[in-house]
Amino acid sequence: MLHIVACIKQVPDTKIIKMNPKTNTMDRSSAPAILNPYDAHAVEEAVRLKARYGGKVSVVTMGPPPAVKAIRKCIEIGADEGYLITDRAFAGADTLATSYSLTKAIEKIGTMEPIDLIICGKMTIDGDTGQVGPGIARRLDIPPLTSVNKVVEIDREAGQAIVHRKLEDGYEVIQTTLPCLFSVEKEINEIPYSTLPNMMRAARYQPMIWSVEDLGIVDRTKLGLKGSPTIVAKVWPPEKPKGGEMLQGSSEEQVNRLFSILMNKKELFHKSGAREEGGVQ
Amino acid sequence: MAEKFDVIVVGAGPAGTACAYTLAKQGVSVLLLERGEYPGSKNVMGGVLYRKMMEDIIPGFYKEAPVERPIVEQRFMMLDKESAATFSYKGMEWGKEPYNNFTVLRAKFDQWFANQAVAQGALLINETVALECIVKDGKVVGVRTDRPEGDIYADVVVLADGVNSLLAKSLGFHKEFRPDEVALAVMEVLKLDKKIIEDRFNLEGDQGCTIEIFGDSTKGILGTAWLYTNKDSLNIGVGTMLSGLIKHKLKPYELLEYVKTHPMIRPYIQGTEQQEYLAHLIPEGGYRSMPKIVGDGVVVVGDAAQMVNAIHREGSNMAMTSGVIAAETIIEARSTGDFSEKSLDVYRQRLMESFVGEDLKKYKDATHHFEKYPHYFEQYIPMINRAASQMFTVDGTSKREKQRKVWQGIGTVGDKIKIARDLFQAWRVMK
Amino acid sequence: MNIEEYRGIWVFLEHKDGAIVPVSLELLGAGRRLADKRGVPLAGILIGDGIKGLAAEAIAYGAETVYVYDDPIFHHYRTESYMRAVIACVEKYKPEIFLYGATSTGKDLASAVATDLATGLTADTTMLDVDAETGLLEASRPAFGGNIMATILCKKDRPQMATVRPKVVKALERDSERTGEVIEEPVELHEADIRTKVLDIVRHTVKKVRLDEADIIVAGGKGLGGRAGFEMIGEFAKRIGASVGGSRDAVEAGWIEHSRQVGQTGVTVTPKIYFAIGISGAIQHLVGMQNSGLIIAINKDPNAAIFQACHYGIVGDAFELVPMLTNAFEQALREEVEHG
């Protein structure tokens, strides 16, 4: 029986979000809020481990009140309980302050039921840092394993687990003690269509909502903006490139023109092994 | 053991939500299933919400609901190629409580409305498609959804799944709709500054205006175009009979482009930015196309039952009313525990006695008549335009001379008799 | 913490298969620039087993000092062991700025170190600068999936840390005449204290040209419509000796593997020639290839954003144009072979 805690975040869908050109900030109303895709895979993995080894999946998130929707999405995937920590004191937190706040929440969850494993997505699609997971691990003094793309096995009795960690050109097989923290890659699993009972459970589910007061002894200087060593000094839209030359004419003319442009770099093609057939892939 | 509710409502549009709200308010356990990501995400409407029917469900709703603008002016343009004859009514009484109607954006409004049903105790599940009704011994006992472990049971299933109701079809309540029973509407939401809207449409504050456009806007096919004002955007759209589109080999988007670039319409949408493009089918068959709407353990409401009065562009109010009547019928049936077709038929009877049934009956021949005789749009509207132009152009001709010209312009005696007959026929189908 | 005590720019020297990885050498180049601006020394930190010989390489690429932690306990990268060495070094020598490559190792290590040191860390930096007077590191990077650029500052804590994307800064020319100091540091770690073990390392067996090292890349997007489209550009890629890449849409549709995804959440590439076929040019994609030498775009949609980001563009049907281009190459190569 494993108690797994998944750390999640509700984020704007950065695939479709637009920037407000007047204020130079993200117009959050232009994109719906979704469960961070990497975290969805983390929760799915936790649910699979629960199916395999028995136990319970709790999810925890730090965010504004609408974040309960992300928790419900986790219940749809199959999580059992959800905790939202929300408080104005958390506002403006960078990754260091965020890992502190989440750690406090996890510690509290741990007092109710000991935790065997913490799992989270590799990174969020709005912050894009990947730093909070390892931060939580360090604060709890448990081993962090980042970029996990497969959980080979978990042996609660022996207090050990074996996973694959993705490398740039392959993967490594790592054995670790428990408890520990995994941050996972999307490729670790595919999320199936939720069952109707899970959908109904999620629609009815009310997560636990905690403010700073509920988290026990907290060092307020480590929260929010105050507890953040980094600040965003400037934000600007990425440079728009000037636009290329459009090749005109019939398809044949266009291709011929393109071909002659490319032939200016003939040596490159020879070097790369261009041949009539075959060649480097 | 799959869960059982008192009622399952399939589709969280105006009909379904009105039904679910009314049931939940009375303590009935309701499951409201929606296939879209959220209620309204799959719904499209020109944009007019009728205050009366909505208020019958939620008094004073406009104080909290996300409505766009209360409509103080309704204009009717009869369009020719380069001219328009317009009739309009503007009334200050419509600009204050209790108001007459509002423009709404369905994605926003439906979500709010569904949340009200949830607040009353309905359970809303999104992103879930009801594939078919579960039938046992000839009685509908539940619904099969597309999710794993997706069967769910209830005493009554309410089909509110829209114009293309697969469930009604699967129960054999109707066959595939013919192209002359349905219209295809396409529309765009165009972003425009609040102040400019108010200037351009001659409105004060948050007031709104609707413009219905007939004639050249649909190039002679039976249909209508429209231009409505939202808070900071305009809805412009055109809807025509599917049979007409097929016959004239037209694509709906081309028709919309034509309307947008028409010299009488163009100035209204100057400087707008396209925000969204939407399309939807609209039931047009009316009374004659209504399918079976009651069965053992099942009732059909809204567009799924073809309840649209196209002549008056009313559909959502009929949908809501049908949802409420269905709910009331079901609540009564619960006291006897009889959910048979005979018992639930009270819904159909009450529906036909209400304004819904009355209006549908009144116009039951209208759509077909206007479709059969295109000259109402093709000839008479241009004729009216020409007459107006002739009468109001000051060119030195005497007024009597002008009258004579207009009268002559209508055509031969034979033509005039034909027109008289056409007007008589139109009166007959409209009365 | 007394900020004044912290001085010097450091680079984490990651190594693989007996060589320092390219990004670390690039960071020495960037570090040199920052160090000159600040008038402070540049150092590298090298951790591993039997790697002290690499210190000379680091010096040839610009490090003035290299702190070496050489011990079998560092044979494989593990967070807990490497982290302890880095922290000990930082606490002893106090750098003001510390840069790491944004590799799986670099990000893993930096995140742990930053938490223990309670200092600021900026991830995936693409632009670096330092204020000569205040000494503040201006680390800029894309955020919100690439939709905006943000500059991050760490005002009150030291060291100011950042992980930096490969190929965004340039290494110095290798100069074996450069001299520097190599300082071997004591290692007081015990295997029993480290809670993870690397049981095996599995490298991709197929000898592929890595996408981020390819000179020519042909990438396909949603416009290709399916696997058939990718087969078509695959033919073209083969003819010209290019690697094949894909946009996120193509990967998510299953038309090409995830390892070939170019973009914000995929690989950043800087080939000499980049073909974007049927790719709309969403910002998340551009972020991954906009520094390519020559960018050619083919798309049916004249309004596709990619046309703003390419050097040459053709509005047309890829299924018509690409095979024609493939033939043109085939012809040319055949003629060359015939005419010697």
Image: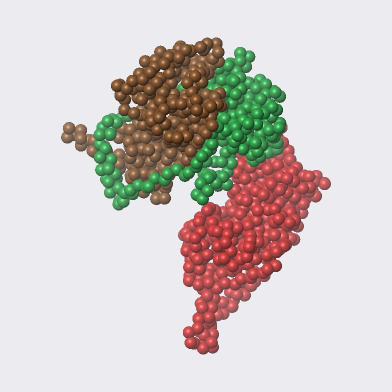
Give the total of numbered labels. Answer: 0
- For the point 51% across and 15% down, which residue is it? C197
Q: Is residue B183 visible?
A: no
What hue does chain C carry in this figure?
brown
x and y, in percent, of residue C121 in the image: 51, 30
Quadrant of the rendered image containing residue C171? top left
Q: Position of residue B271 (x, y in %)?
A: 49, 60
Dividing the picture into quarters, in which one does residue C193 lie? top right
* C84 or A161: nearer the viewer: C84
Task: Give x and y (percent) for residue C186.
Answer: 47, 12
| Left or right: C14, with C191 as reference point | left
Q: Is residue B263 among the parts visible in the rendering? A: yes
Question: Looking at the colours in the rendered structure, which chain would you say is drawn in green?
Answer: A
Residue B306 percent location from the top left of the image: 64, 56
Which residue, as the protein is rendered here, is positioned at the far left? C339
**Quarter of the image where the C terminus of chain B is located:** bottom right
Q: Is residue B406 above or below residue A196?
A: below
Which residue is at 20% across, 37% downward? C335
* Residue at the image position 51 percent from the left and 39 percent from the top: A233
| Left or right of B353 on screen, residue C92 | left
Answer above or below: position of B138 versus A105: below
Colour chain B is painted in: red
Q: Residue at x 25, y 43 (%)?
A: A260
Quarter that holds the N terminus of chain B: top right
Q: Nearer the viewer, residue A212 or B189?
A: A212
Answer above or below: position of B60 versus B120: below
Please name the colour scheme applied to the rendered image. by chain
